[in-house]
Image (cartoon, rainbow, N blue to C red):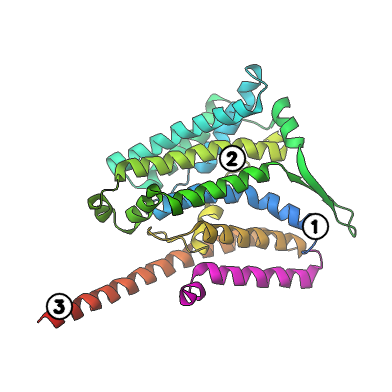
Amino acid sequence: MKKRIFTSAEFYVGLVLLFLCFMIQAKSGQFFTGNNAVDLLRAFSVPAMFCIGEMFVIITGGVDVSFPAIASMSMFIVCSRMEQVTDNPLLFFAAAMLIGLVVGLVNGYIIARFRFPALIVTLGTSSICFGIMQGVFKSREYPLCAPLYELGQMKLFSVTNPVSGLTSDMPVGIILTILLIFVGWFILNRTMLGRGIYAIGGDEKAAQRAGFQVFKTIVFIYAFSGCMAGLIGVLRSTMLLAVHPNNLEGLELTVIAACVLGGVRMEGGKGTIWGALLGMALLTVMDNSLILLDISTTWQKVFTGAVIIIGTAVSALQMKRNSRKLTVQVSDVEGGKQ
């Protein structure tokens, strides 16, 4: 058990995260302040929720790059069209989740039924969603409707930095982040569906023989990712107090990098909620540190790209090493029989 902890990706990411936090504090003196902690949690909450849906997909051996487009389209359609229909904010979230669910089901059905590459399908879906949003609905920056604006104004608490005088508010949306993290953990670790997700990523044919519903499981995870994207899109608008159609564009690389950094294997079959969240926490702290240390945020993109390449390479090397060990074990067994 101890050996597994000290060799896990989560352990090393956690160490790097702690080291980075103390290093930034030593340099700036502002990291371990209440308002900076609130700002970090605000910046972490939305990408962290995306991480949950994305890691479900990656564990099965797929990849979804359409969730920012689904979130943006759902957010814009709901926020710009539903104010004339209802003033109940819950219905705004429900409508966005329904839009995301439909798009996710389309993704999942095409990938599971026709065995098309997930990257190509979701890339196409992403382009279609942005095209519909811009071409059909004429997307633009849009004032947030009154029901959602009032929700966005609600806060759990506020923290003021005594040195700088800056005040940061903790949004009520953080409760939803905690709830979705728990739901994701429960599905992966306490249900047969979670076992099926890991089994499909490890060996799809073996999972099929073991009785797991491969087709239904794949459709579910893309539908789940799409549904969550719709929900998160509206939540994001309440945190910004405005509708920004392109605000989430490009976030897919950061989310995938966070998952890989946290030990979610791109080839599938391995990964944990906590690993993905630690990876996202590290990227969030890095982004925050660049601001505190007055370094251009463009360097974060360099780091994100490097993480994806290095993480994928490490996963590939681990698979080769495991394959060699399995070959040696089989050879030893066969030699013993002879």
Residue 2 image point, x, y percent: 49, 76
- Look at the image and tell me in which quarter the C terminus lies: bottom left
| x, y percent for residue 245 | 62, 36
Gap between marks 2 and 1 measured at Cα:
25 Å
Between residues 75 and 210, which one lies in front from this camera angle?
210
How far apart marks 3 and 2 lie (CA) works out to: 53 Å
Dot 2 or dot 1, earlier in sequence: 1
Segment tinted magenta in the rendering: 1-30
Q: Mark 2 points at which residue?
A: 232
* Mark 1 lies on residue: 34
Picture layout, residue 101 above or below residue 12: above
Q: Which residue occupies the extreme left position in the image? A: 338
Classify residue 120 as left or right of residue 9: left
Q: As shown in the figure, which amino acid type bears the numbered disc 3?
A: Glu
User: Magenta residues: mostly which secondary structure?
Assistant: helix
**Could you tell me the amino acid type at mark 1?**
Gly
Residue 235 visible in rendering: yes
Residue at point 67%, 70% (across, down): 20
Q: Where is residue 262 in the image (x, y as percent from the top left)?
A: 52, 63
Q: What residue type is labelled 2?
A: Ile
Q: What element carries label 1?
A: helix
Figure check: 282 above or below 73: below
Give the labeled residue for mark 3. Answer: 334
Say which of 129 and 165 sits in front.
165
